[in-house]
Image: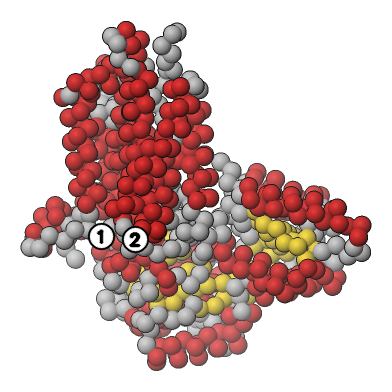
Amino acid sequence: MTQISRRTILAGAAAAAASSSLSPAFAMDPLKIGFVYVSPIGDAGWTYQHDLGRKAIEAEFGDKIKTAYVESVPEGPDAERVIRQFAAGGTKLIFATSFGYMNPTIKIAKTFPQTSFCHCSGYKRSANVSTYLARFYEGRYLAGIAAGKATKSNVMGYVAAFPIPEVVRGINAFTRGARSVNPDVQVRVIWISSWYDPGKEREAAETLISQGADVVTQHTDSTAVVQTAEDRGVFAVGYHSDMSKYGPKAHLTASTHNWNGYYVDKVKEMLETGKVASGDTWGGFGKGMVELAPFGPGVDDETRKMIAAKQADIAAGKLHPFAGPVTDNEGKVRVPEGQSMSDGDLLGNNFYVEGVAGKLPS
Amino acid sequence: MDGLDSAVAIIVGAIRAGTPLVFAALGELITEKSGVLNLGVEGMMLIGAVVGFIATVTTGSVFLGIVAAVIAGMLTSLIFGFLTLSLLTNQVATGLALTIFGVGLSAFLGIRYVGTPISGLKPVEIPFLSDIPVLGPLLFGHDLLIYFSFVLFAAVAWFLYKSRGGLVLRAVGESHDAAHALGYSVIGIRYLAVMFGGACAGLSGAYLSLVYTPQWAENMTAGRGWIALALVVFATWRPGRAMLGAYLFGGITIMGLHIQALGFEVSSHLVATLPYIATIVVLALISRDATKIRLNAPASLGKPFHPAA
């Protein structure tokens, strides 16, 4: 079932027609930039944050560039078709913003060597394919501190999609943040086997709350968990976007990501050199790619100050959320004191840290 | 927290999770009993969900939102009815198209409403009664639509098996030619059955967008329409079994979440598939009598009817 928005296709076609008919009149055509989104833009969430980045480059470069996007592109053959359509239509810089676009991007990049591709969250690169991702775990760690200070029951709930390293890392960072201020905290995890199912996300949150969790958070794509927390009078930590309007009282903060800087950099590079040099970008607070949403009423002044100080330390590289000793939840020391978890180990994170209940599904 | 409280939480959660399935399945059951297979349940649910949400935001009344959702579901089903009953298009293809249409149209209509917070329908609190341990939350703490789903179930069961109208409906579903020969308006009755199915699907969508998760998000039904369709078949077109299946499905989903949250060692993939497996197994076991399946299945299901043919 394809859900490519007709509106954007039409807009894209109109833009293409307009630029081709105008091209003889202008010496410099605007640089065409394409974005491929996995979900609808909506008003919160993963794709929404990327679209803010698209708007940021439009504001920054004005008529020097022309952006287009296709939303709700399923991973797989549809993605290949959309990316190919962009490249064949003269789009010189393409941002593919979902993990599952990795193989199609690599494949199409071979056929279009003059086009630069940036793929978010993948690990395959080539001469004209770069990768980029944000260190979400840094935000999770600080959000965990806010949660650890707010909890009374010392039980927290985490609604998670699939047990992949990216999600596990977030759970671990959140837990370590919470336990850095409250060593009695226990985090309970429910895997709902879906990135997006508001009904099931709500059921999972209700379950965690009924088992005593008084702070809940999620690594899924809807706002249902924050809303449930508001209804049930407990706290919540949002993800992707500021979700405070779904839970004005419940929302402590949210770990959000900001792609504006990265997109502006890459477009600038493209305009100056005609291509994006292949490489990987994995930025956190230091690069402004991770941010915390404004604090809610459940976070006291002292905690706000403390989190601000730790955020500065993380940005400066003085504090690492996975600084040793890192112990897993079976008591085994994974990273000795004095060292920090390497990027490679972080990317392959496959164990729960101390404080997470249960066993990681394999 | 003790085991009893957990059990109560699971049962209450099961009823809440099962209710949208109950609505959609009861509606589809009546539609199919008249001999029409409408695969557009998911699409009608989405349209009901979005229209109900928009109406609630616009009027400020959840009640009007629910009414609007029911009407929207009914109107959507009329498109299907017109195509399949009056123009004799293929029911399977038309139903699938209706789902695709519903997904797209609901996303389009709802684009400005994504992220609009509403307060939704709250559970009714009956003084004293809701505070009784165990029985209170089980019987008295639900929202009004859940109580309505009980009423609807009783009405559907009574109508199908105890009323003359139900007999006519089933006759039309069994053999439209015979019903036609007896002078019943096959097309008219099927229109009514399709509209009832649409109204129920709209209500089911409204339950999701106004009660269960009071918000509008694209594609928020997440496949529940298809589950309701499957429930009708596995329940061998019996309302009681469809309702049991819906609660079973909801209950095992919720139980899986509780088991995970307690930290038991279970595969999350298994937990995710268990509701499907368990519901199919249980319903297949209670309806394993092949003769009875044949008796319950509407013999004219999916077959087009033309009076002159």
Residue depicted at x 43% and y 73%: A244
Chain letter for mark 2: B
Hey, which quadrant is residue B279 in on the image? top left
Q: Give percent across and percent down for residue A321.
A: 51, 79
Residue A353 appears in the picture as rendered: no
- Asked if residue A101 lies left or right of residue A163, the reply is right
- Residue type beneath disc 1: Lys
Residue depicted at x 37% and y 82%: A297
Q: Give percent across and percent down for residue B136.
A: 12, 57
Front residue (pair A336, A109): A109
Hey, which quadrant is residue B39 in on the image? top left
**Looking at the rendered structure, which numbered label has been put on residue A90?**
none
As helix, strand or loop, the secondary structure at mark 1 comes to loop
As helix, strand or loop, the secondary structure at mark 2 comes to loop
Q: Give percent across and percent down for residue A279.
A: 74, 68
Label 1 neighbour load within 10 Å: few <14, some 14-19, many 20+ = some
Q: Quadrant of the N terminus of chain B?
A: bottom left
Labels 2 and 1: the sequence-earlier one: 2
- Asked if residue A103 lies left or right of residue A228, the reply is right
Marks 2, 1 in one chain: yes
Residue A7 appears in the picture as rendered: yes
Label 2 to label 1, Cα distance in Å?
14 Å
Outermost residue to the front: B59
Chain letter for mark 1: B
Reading the image, the residue beneath label 2 is B60
Residue depicted at x 26% and y 76%: A153
